[in-house]
Amino acid sequence: MKLIKFILLFFVSISLFSQNFRSEKVKNEGQILADKNNGYYKNPIFPGNYGDPSLVRVKDDYYVAFSRTNGIIIWHSKDLVNWKPVVRHRLPAGFNTVWAIDLQYFNNKFYVYMPIKVFPNKKEGAFGNFVITAEKPEGPWSEPINLDIEIPDGDYSGIDPGFIQTPTGEKYLYVNHGWAMQLNDEGTKAISKPKIVYDGWDYPKDWVVECKCLESPKLFYKDGFYYMVSAEGGTSGPSTAHMSVVARAKHPLGPWENSPYNPLTHTNNQEEAFWHQGHGTVFEAADGTWWTIYHGRVKNFTEMGRPALLMPIEWTKDGWPIQKMGYSSNALIPKPKGENVGHGLPLSDNFDSKEPAIQWYYDNEKVNNFSLGNKQLKMKASGDSFKTASEIYNYAPNISFEVTVKINGASKNAISGLRLGNEGIATNGENVFLAEGPDWRVRQSIYSLKNKKGVWLKIKNMQKDLSLFYSEDGENWIKFDCSLRAHDSYKYGLFSYGTNQVIFEEFKYQGLE
C-alpha cells in the first residue's frame, strides 16, 4: 500500500512540475496569461492569432482546435482558461489551405470537419469538405476522407462546416450560406443533396458591417430545440463588422427562428477592447454552466490576427442564450470550475527536437528542406524571394515583443533571415541588410560583416514601430539607422531562398509589455 501511494504521489508531482514548468516558461517569455491566479481570468484566453475556435467537451475534459494552412492544432483544458497543447496534426502532402473547422466527439471517436482549398484530384470549385478521425486527440489521425459534398460555385460556398447529431443518432452537416445536408451513420459521407435551409438574421440597416456573409454554423441540442450559432457581418472590414447570431428549430433542418436577443456577441463601437467579435461556439461546461468561445481582434492592432475569447452565457426565461449580464469582454470574470492543467506554449526554440517543434508552421511541400539536431535547424534554401522561400513561422501573442536568432553558414547563393510580415533583416554570409515591402526592397546601405562566421539578427516591435539590429557576437548590437512600421502582420519567420543550406540557432521570443 505504501508503494502504491508513493507511485501515485510521484506521478502527481511529475504532472504538477510539468504544468508549472510550462507556465513559468511562458510567463518568463512575457506572454499574456488569462488566469490572474485570484479566482478570475481576463480575455483573451488565447492571445495572438487563434481565430475560428472549435470546442468539444468529453465529460470534464475540454478540447479546442484551430486550423492553419496545412492542418490543425488541438489544446486540452479542464477549467477553460488554462490550456496545454496536445498535438499539431499536419495533413499529408497535396493538402493545403484549411479554413474554419469543427471539432466533434461521437461514436467514441474525435472528428474534425474541415474545408480544404488545395487537395489531390480537385475538381472545379473553391473548396472540398473533408473529415479526419482519431480515437484520441493526440492521434493517430486518419487520412482526410472526402465527404463528397458539392456546393454550387461562387463566393467561397462550402466553408465553415458545423455538425449536429440528433438524440436518435441522425447526423447533419451545415456549411456557410445556410446550406445543409444529411450524413451517413459514420459521419463520413453526405447522403442527401445540399439545400439552403437558413437565411440568417437581418441586422439593422444602419449597422456598420462589411457584408452579411452568413458563415460559421455551430450547432447544439437543448431541451427539445436545435440551436445554431452563426457568424455574420464579415470577418474584417469595419471594427463593428463581425457578430455571432442565434437561431433555433425543432428539426435539425429547420424551419429556423431567430433569437429576439440577437446578436450574441458583437463589437458595438470602436472604444471596445476587442473588435470584430464573432464566430462563436456555445457549450455547456461540466458543472452545468454555459459559455461561448469565439474570436475578436485587439483594438487598433488588427494585424495581430484574431485572439480567442471566453464569455459566460445565461438563458432567458423563453429559452434563448445571451451573454451573462454585468460582464464585458475585457472584464475580470470568475473562472470556471476545474483543474489547472498548466498553460501555454513556449515560443523560444533551441532546435533540440527531431522535427520543427509544435509552435512552428511550415509548408507541407517543403518539410524535407528542414533537418534538426545538435541544437541546430538546417534549412535548405528554395525559391527566388522570401515569398517562395523555405520558412518556418509563427504569430506573436504580444502587442510589443522582440525576436532574435543566430545564423551560421549563410552564403552568397542563399539569402537568409528573420522577418515580421513584409519587413525584416537578411544576410548572405558577407553582409546584412534591411528590406521591406512585398518585393523585399532593400531599404538602406548594406553592412559588411567582419568575421563571416555567423551573425545574430533581432527585430524589436514596440506597438508596430520596428527597430532592427544585428550582432557579430550575440551581445553587442548594432541598430539599423532606418526603423520601420509593421503594416500587414504579426507573423514572424525564419527563411532562406536561393540555393545551398543555412543553419539557424538560438531562436528567442520575448514579450515586452
Image (cartoon, rainbow, N blue to C red):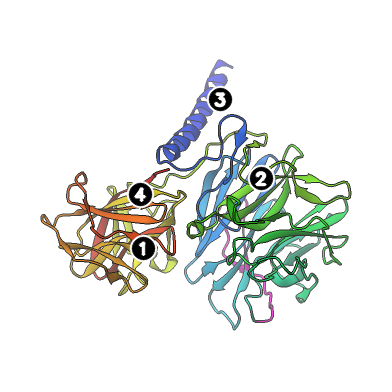
The tag on residue 391 is 1
Earlier sequence position, callout 2 versus callout 4 = 2
Quadrant of the drawing holding the N terminus: top right
Q: Which residue is mark 2?
A: 328
Task: Tell me if label 1 and label 3 are in contact, CB under 8 Å.
Answer: no
The amino acid sitting under disc 3 is: Leu
Mark 3: few, some, or many residues within 10 Å (few <14, many ≥20)? few
Return the residue at label 3: 8
In this rendering, does residue 136 appear at all?
no
- The location of residue 467, given as percent across then percent down, is 31, 54
Q: Which residues are magenta?
A: 130-153
Mark 3 or mark 2: which is in front?
A: 2
242 drawn magenta? no
Q: Earlier in the sequence, mark 1 or mark 2?
A: 2
Q: Is residue 104 left or right of residue 95?
A: right
Residue 95, relative to residue 463: is it above or below? below
Q: Which residue is mark 4?
A: 402
Q: Position of residue 314 (x, y in %)?
A: 78, 44
- The alpha-carbon separation of the residues under discs 4 and 3 comes to 42 Å
Question: N-terminal of the two: label 3 or label 2?
Answer: 3
Label 4 vs label 1: CA separation? 19 Å
**Cβ atoms under marks 4 and 1 closer than 8 Å:** no
| Image location (x, y in percent) of residue 44 | 57, 46
How crowded pointer 2 is (Cα within 10 Å; few <14, some 14-19, many 20+) is rated as some
Q: Quadrant of the C terminus?
A: top left
Separation of disc 3 and disc 2 at Cα?
A: 42 Å
Where is 322 relative to 482, above or below? Answer: above
Q: Residue at x 52, y 69 (%)?
A: 97
Q: Earlier in the sequence, mark 1 or mark 3?
A: 3
